[in-house]
Image: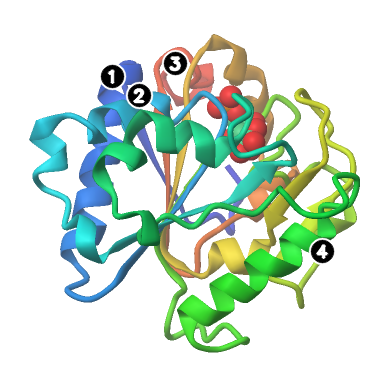
C-alpha cells in the first residue's frame, strides 16, 4: 500500500459479512448526525447485498428515513427504468419501499439530447449545490455523511476511468463522461473526485476472486482512479477473502 495512504482496510469473510459490515457503517454515520443525513450510493453489483439488507425489517427499522437523503455517485446514461440504471437498481431493491420520494435524488438521464450527458451533469451539480446550500465545498463541512464506492477491473471507481480528463476536474462537481472504459459501454455521468471526497467517510466494497488482480495493483500504490479517491475524513475498504491479495492474508 502507498506510504501516503490513509485507507483503513477491513477484511471480511464473504459477501454477506461485507453487506452486514457496510450496513453498520451506514447506521453509525446516520446516528452520528442528528440533522439531515446525505448518503451517496454506488452502482454495479457490489452494493446489491447491502441494499437488500437495508430493506429487511431489522435494518429498515433502524434508519431515520425522513431525514436521510440518497444520492448516487455515478450513473449510466440510460433511462431511469433501464435495468442498467444505477439509481434505478437501488430504488427497486430498497429505496422505493423505504424512503420518501423527495429524499431520493437520481441523476437525470432523460435530457433532451441522449448523446450529451453534460446536461444531466449540470442539472445534478445544481441539485447538489442547492442541497448543500453553497456552490463551493468547504472542507470543514462535508457534503456527504457517507459515500459508497466500488472498484472496476481497470481500477476505475464511480465513472472515473484511467486516463480520462474527468479525473483531473477540480471546478465542476459533476461531469459527463462520453466513453466508458468497461461494460456497459454507454456514456456516464459522474461526481468528480473533490465532490466524492467531501464526506465524513468513503466506503469501498470489493469482493470476489476477479477483483484480486486489480486490488494487488491498487494496494501496491499504482496511480489508478480508485487510489485517487480518498475522503477528506475516513476512507474504509471492505474486502472479502476472495478479493484480498495474498500479501494481505488472502
Ligand atoms: C458503475 C459503477 C462502477 C462500479 C464498479 C464496480 O456504474 O458501473 O458505479 O464504478 O462500482 O465498476 O462494479 P461491480 O460492483 O459490478 O464490480
Residue at the disc numbered 2: 49
SS category of the residue bearing label 2: helix
SS category of the residue bearing label 1: helix
Cα–Cα span, label 4 and label 2: 32 Å
Name the disc covering residue 16, or none: 1
Residue at 28 percent of width and 19 percent of height: 16
Left or right: 7 as drawn, with respect to 168: left
Name the disc covering residue 250, or none: 3
SS category of the residue bearing label 3: loop
| N-term-proximal mark, 4 vs 2 | 2
| N-term-proximal mark, 2 vs 3 | 2
Q: Is residue 220 above or below residue 6?
A: above
Q: Is residue 168 above or below residue 90?
A: below
Ligand 1 quadrant in view: top right
Marks 2 & 1, CB-CB < 8 Å contact? yes
Residue at 26 percent of width and 23 percent of height: 17
| N-term-proximal mark, 2 vs 1 | 1
| N-term-proximal mark, 1 vs 3 | 1
Q: Residue furthest front?
A: 112
- Crowdedness near tag 1: few (<14), some (14–19) or many (≥20) residues, C-alpha within 10 Å: some
Mark in the foreground, 4 or 2: 2
Name the disc covering residue 168, or none: 4
Residue 34 horizontal/vertical position (percent): 17, 74
Residue 158 horizontal/vertical position (percent): 64, 45
- Crowdedness near tag 3: few (<14), some (14–19) or many (≥20) residues, C-alpha within 10 Å: some
Cα–Cα span, label 1 and label 3: 17 Å
Amino acid at each position: 500500500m502507498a506510504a501516503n495512504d490513509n485507507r483503513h482496510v477491513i477484511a471480511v469473510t464473504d459477501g454477506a459479512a461485507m453487506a452486514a459490515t457496510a450496513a453498520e457503517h451506514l447506521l453509525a454515520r446516520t446516528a452520528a448526525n442528528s440533522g439531515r443525513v446525505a448518503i451517496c450510493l454506488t452502482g454495479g453489483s457490489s452494493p446489491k447485498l447491502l441494499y437488500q439488507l437495508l430493506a429487511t425489517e431489522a435494518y429498515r427499522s433502524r434508519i431515520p428515513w425522513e431525514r436521510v437523503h440518497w444520492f448516487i455517485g455515478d450513473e449510466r446514461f440510460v433511462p431511469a427504468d433501464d435495468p442498467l440504471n444505477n439509481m434505478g437498481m437501488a430504488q427497486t431493491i430498497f429505496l422505493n419501499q423505504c424512503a420518501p420520494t423527495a429524499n431520493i435524488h437520481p441523476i437525470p438521464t432523460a435530457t433532451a439530447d441522449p448523446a450529451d450527458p453534460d446536461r444531466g451533469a449540470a442539472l445534478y451539480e445544481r441539485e447538489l449545490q442547492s442541497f448543500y446550500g453553497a456552490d463551493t465545498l468547504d472542507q470543514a463541512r462535508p457534503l456527504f455523511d457517507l459515500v459508497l464506492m466500488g472498484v472496476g477491473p481497470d481500477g476505475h471507481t464511480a465513472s472515473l476511468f484511467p486516463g480520462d480528463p474527468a479525473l483531473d476536474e477540480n471546478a465542476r462537481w459533476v461531469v459527463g463522461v462520453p466513453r466508458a472504459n468497461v461494460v456497459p459501454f454507454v456514456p456516464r455521468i459522474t461526481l468528480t473526485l473533490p465532490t466524492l471526497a467531501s464526506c465524513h467517510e468513503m466506503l469501498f466494497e470489493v469482493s470476489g476472486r476477479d477483483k484480486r488482480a486489480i486490488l494487488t495493483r491498487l494496494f501496491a500504490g499504482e496511480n489508478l482512479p480508485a487510489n485517487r479517491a480518498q475522503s477528506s475524513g475516513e476512507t474504509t475498504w471492505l474486502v472479502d477473502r476472495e478479493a484480498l491479495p495474498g500479501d494481505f492474508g488472502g
